[in-house]
């Protein structure tokens, strides 16, 4: 099993957690809630885990128009 390291600082103190992950959709920033990420405990960089990347990919495909139960109009 290959050891994961931080893409920012190469640190290996990564912690899996669910976090809000912001993505840029054109000029709009969209915060995706509860994405599986690994947080670097050294520099606090958030890196989406495989599951999280799937979720992010869905948002890109749908242009952020995924109904998550709470509709907020900008
Ligand atoms: Zn780091």
Image (cartoon, grey):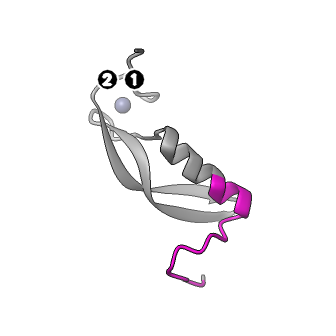
Residue at image point 59% right, 63% down: 29
Q: Is residue 52 magenta?
A: no
State the image coordinates of residue 6 (x, y, percent, origin top left).
40, 28
Number of numbered callouts drawn: 2
Judged from the image, the quadrant occupied by ligand 1 is top left
**Left or right: where does residue 13 sit relative to residue 51?**
left
The span shown in magenta is 58-73
State the image coordinates of residue 43 (x, y, percent, origin top left).
33, 36
**Left or right: where does residue 8 sit relative to residue 28?**
left
Q: Is residue 59 magenta?
A: yes
Which is nearer the eye, 68 or 63? 68
Question: What residue sits right under mark 2 in the picture?
Answer: 12
Residue at image point 71% right, 64% down: 63
Is disc 1 placed on a helix, strand or loop? Answer: loop
Question: What residue sits right under mark 1 in the picture?
Answer: 5
The answer to which of marks 1 and 2 sits earlier in the sequence is 1
Q: Contact (CB < 8 A) between labels 1 and 2?
A: yes
| 39 relative to 29, above or below | above
């Amino acid at each position: 099993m290959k050891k994961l390291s931080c893409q920012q600082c190469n640190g290996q103190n990564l912690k899996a957690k669910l976090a809000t992950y912001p993505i840029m959709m054109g000029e709009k920033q969209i915060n995706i809630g509860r994405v599986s990420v690994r947080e670097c405990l050294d520099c606090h960089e958030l890196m989406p885990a495989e599951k999280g990347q799937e979720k992010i990919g869905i948002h890109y495909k749908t242009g952020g128009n995924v109904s998550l139960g709470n509709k907020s109009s900008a």
